Image (cartoon, rainbow, N blue to C red):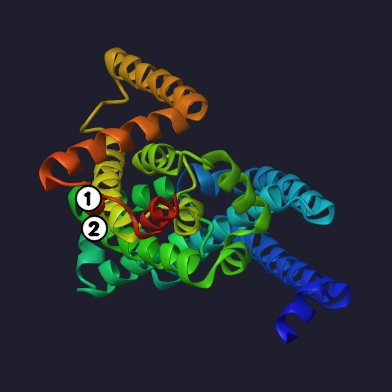
Amino acid sequence: MKEDRQETDPVLADGKKKTKKAGAFAVFIVCSAAVIFLTVACLARFETGFIAEHASVISSVAVGIELIYIGAALFFLLRGSEIASKLFLSGEVIAAGLLSVLFLLQVTGLFDKIDSVEELRRLIGSTGVWAPLIYIAVQFLQVVILPLPGTLTVGAGVLLFGPLKASLFSLAGIFLGSLAAFAVGRRLGYKAAAWLVGKESLDTWLQKVKGKDKVVLGAMFLLPIFPDDILCFVAGLSTMSLRFFIVLQLITRSASVFMTSYSLNGSLIPFDTWWGIAIWCLLAAAVIAVFILLFKKGDKIEAWLMKKWRKLCKKKAGEDGALCVRPHERDDRGQE
């Protein structure tokens, strides 16, 4: 009763909304100040080269661009646009984090020692298991909490560890994070998922996959251009079973992570040849065409696949194929 009263009480609801907005503004102010300060501080520490010679001009341009970006972020925050404001805040958090790392490397003198990617990887390798564990934790958190694009974190892993290790570490963190997000949606429900990823975003994707969760979600997980973190919560709120979700994650995430790692590395399809660029353009066109088809005919495709699956189950079971039907479907059949 108390929980129901809190949910319907407009005063409590308004207070919760104001608290959440105040937290977003606090993050916005801290990150904005950090980005501007660290930009100037990092540029000032370059002693030689092009950046050192034109530090004042570069600082002015960089800070000007940052102020425009901060103004746009503030506009969407004040307007209350959840998706846009979260996107801009994510950019500020990422920029503040990267500049903080750069500043620490400069202060400790490690930046001058890193003159190649190989040297960077050697330095990371000297940390033992800590760097991989931290990276796996980041990949876990980017699915559950951190609003970071998976392609960005995988790309950072390729730079730090190389494509093979980055793929393995990413897969471990992303798989564990995906299971956690699915569990939140399945066990804690819609409100917990909406609190973590945002009600507006969650509702948008729930509506997009409604009635075709297996086919559309499977295709979305396969490609690195969709918000995988939100989709894991959506899967937990859908009719998808845990077993199906685990198998789906193992197949699609493995393919997606390895494809992204080796694509960003340029060893799968090169970016510096005309035929490589042509292949990437054809792949992009194919992805668009497939998803237009899935969004328009996804429910029919899923129904057809489930019908084939049940026929296969009946053939193997030699009876009514009850083993292939989920419990709630058995109840429906019994009532009929």
Q: Is residue 131 above or below residue 79?
A: below
Label 1 secondary element: loop
Instruction: Tell which tag, 2 or 1, sits nearer the viewer.
Output: 1
**Viewport quadrant of the N terminus:** bottom right
Q: Are marks 2 and 1 in contact (CB under 8 Å)?
A: yes
Q: Is residue 134 above or below residue 294?
A: below
The three-letter code of the residue at mark 2 reads: Arg
Q: Residue furthest right?
A: 11
Viewer-proximal residue, 234 or 64? 234
Point out which mark residue 162 bears. Answer: 1
x, y percent for residue 223: 37, 38
Determine the residue positioned at 69% across, 43% down.
65
Left or right relative to 281: residue 28: right
Q: Which callout, 2 or 1, points at the residue further toward the start of the chain?
A: 2
93 or 16, which lies in front?
Answer: 16
Q: Within 10 angstroms of label 1, few (less than 14), some, or many (20 or more) residues?
A: some
Residue indicated by mark 2: 121
Residue furthest bottom as drawn = 2
Residue 45 point in image, percent of width and height: 52, 60
